[in-house]
Image (spheres, grey):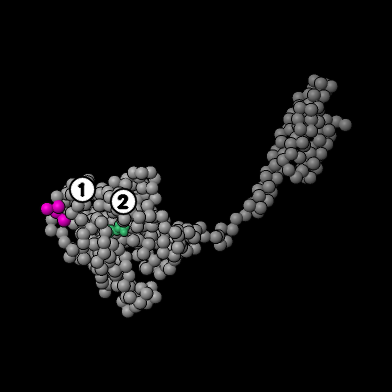
Amino acid sequence: MGMMERIQEIRERMIRQLDSAENRQALEDIRVSLLGKKGDLTALLRSMGQLSPEERPAAGQLINEAREHMTELLEKRAAEIRAVEMAVALKRERLDVTEPAPLPRVGSEHPIHLVMNDLVECFTGMGFEVLEGPEVELDHYNFELMNIPKNHPARDAQDTFYVDDNIVLRTHTSPMQARAMLTRRPPIRVICPGRVYRADEVDATHSPVFHQMEGLVIDRDVNMADLRGTLNAFARKIYGEGIETRFRPSFFPFTEPSTEVDLTCAACHGSGCRICKNTGWIEVLGAGMVNPRVLEMCGIDSSVYSGFAFGIGMERIAMLRYGISDMRLLYEGDARFLGQFR
Ligand code: PHE
């Protein structure tokens, strides 16, 4: 067999093999067996020594041309295989971006926070400053400066969580009154929203953790009418026009006189319903004129200044506003419930 025929035979073998090669590995095997160091075409090149010197250049050229051609054939087939692989991958990894996807759950503000934000907006609009303080509080602020000395019966009424003899979980936001007076000069107008703690059993209207918002105003000539006017403005801002306040005499050691404040029941507008137990009124806060003893203990001259304070129960407000009948719902963290108050 002459050189030409042998080259041609190798080339045709490659064309046949390429036809049935389906992947890159098959191509590589073909390349190695024909063009590789021990491949057939390379062997042919090596056998050129047997040719006469005149024949060699022409034969060398033929082999080199064949090598180039065969390399091209390999690359062409490799490109075809890549195209097929790409088409298969695209089909397999197909993504339908128009297919409806489950919506991610979006969080929502907690009803207590919605109420708190409204109250803060209402009072800052009237010139109050927002002050926050510790939930783990010194007995001194929580009780002593609020005119509740050791052995005072009001301590029992508050079912205190003691951390140690001198430290409690604050039972109300009233210690912030003392903290405000001790760090500011009159005129003082502050509100202090936050969590408070009492060792109460959990039921539909009680929780060991709940929220209050304290209010405190100290200035010259502050009187009970100022307290009434401020609370009327608050009631109308939160529940709308036509809401009245009703003051009932009460007792707190830190205010004198003291009062429980009722608002017109927003559910029935005062005509009487299940929510207000047919009274037409809902109790939402305690208030009073700051006891002069408290002013003096907190470094304020009670012969020059007077003030009022109030403490609003935020759960109460939220439950009334949103028609929530069981306080436990506020603390269970059920997203289906909480998502309704967006
Ligand atoms: N601290 C009182 C309570 O927790 C509420 C209150 C605050 C009363 C301010 C009067 C003045 O019940």
Q: Which residue is rendered at x = 83% and y = 30% of the image?
A: 3
Q: Which residue is rendered at x = 40% and y = 61% of the image?
A: 111
**Residue 133 rendering spot, x and y as whole percentages:** 31, 48
Numbered label attached to residue 94: none
Location of the C terminus (image quadrant):
bottom left
**Residue 50 rendering spot, x and y as whole percentages:** 84, 22
Numbered label attached to residue 297: 1
Answer few, some or many: residues within 10 Å of disc 2's Cα (few below 14, many 20 plus, some between 14 and 19).
Answer: few
Q: CA distance from mark 1 to mark 2?
A: 19 Å
Q: Is 305 covered by the magenta stretch?
A: yes
Tag 2: residue type?
A: Asn
Q: Kindly tell me whether residue 108 is visible in this rendering.
A: no
The answer to whether the beta carbon of the residue marked 1 is less than 8 Å from any atom of ligand 1 is no
Give the side of residue 182 with respect to residue 103, left or right.
left
Tag 1: residue type?
A: Met
Q: Secondary structure at mark 1?
A: helix
Q: Which residue is rendered at x = 18% and y = 57% of the image?
A: 307
Q: Secondary structure at mark 2?
A: loop
Give the side of residue 279 with respect to residue 70, left or right.
left
Among numbered discs 1 and 2, the one appearing first in the sequence:
2
Q: Residue furthest bottom?
A: 271
Q: Kindly tell me whether residue 9 is visible in this rendering.
A: yes
Numbered label attached to residue 151: 2
**Residue 38 rendering spot, x and y as whole percentages:** 79, 28
Q: Is 56 covered by the magenta stretch?
A: no
Q: Magenta region, mostly helix, strand or loop?
A: loop
Q: Magenta segment range?
A: 302-306
